[in-house]
Image: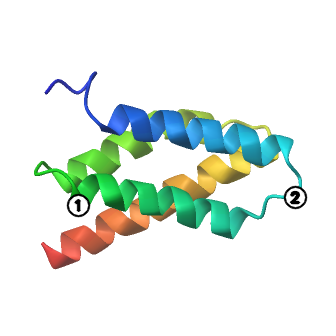
Amino acid sequence: MSAKLGPYVQMVKLAREMALRYDKDKNLALTPLLSHYLDEVEINIASDAFDHRGFMTSIRNDIHPEASNAADDRRSEFLRAAVKALDERVEKHELEG
């Protein structure tokens, strides 16, 4: 499957959509929303037999440019948190693998 059509594309779209919702709804807490997102990433990793590290890195790389914007809105806050969490999971998978 090509990188342009890989399952990580859906995870990138989900991160961006969740970031938009987090930005618009001030009642949403970051930690549970981020936890839900990471659960979705883990489900995708568990359901496929491909390069898990590459999968997470691809997601991270595609959401990172938006996460590094100078804007300090809640959307950027979510994306920065998602990038950080994905980096931590990549490191964990490297240590385990």
In this view, which residue lies farthest toward the right? 26
Where residue 11 sits, quadrant-wise, is top left
Q: Distance between the residues labelled 1 and 2?
A: 31 Å
The residue identified by callout 2 is 27
Q: What residue did someone put label 1 on?
A: 46
Q: Could you tell me residue 90's position as x and y percent?
A: 31, 62
Q: Give the side of residue 7 with respect to residue 35, left or right.
A: left
Tell me: residue 17, above or below residue 35. above
Q: Where is residue 64 in the image (x, y as percent from the top left)?
A: 52, 41
Q: Which of 25 and 75 is in front in this view?
A: 25
Q: Which part of the image, by quadrant, shows the C terminus? A: bottom left
Q: Which of 33 and 58 is in front in this view?
A: 33
Residue beneath the point at 33% across and 38% down:
8
Q: What residue type is labelled 1?
A: Ala
Can residue 36 be seen in this snapshot? yes
Q: Relative to 90, is 74 on the left or the right?
A: right
Kindly tell me whether residue 72 is visible in this rendering. Answer: no
Q: Residue 94: where, in percent of width, then height? A: 20, 69
In the rendered structure, the answer to whether residue 12 lies left or right of residue 57 reads right
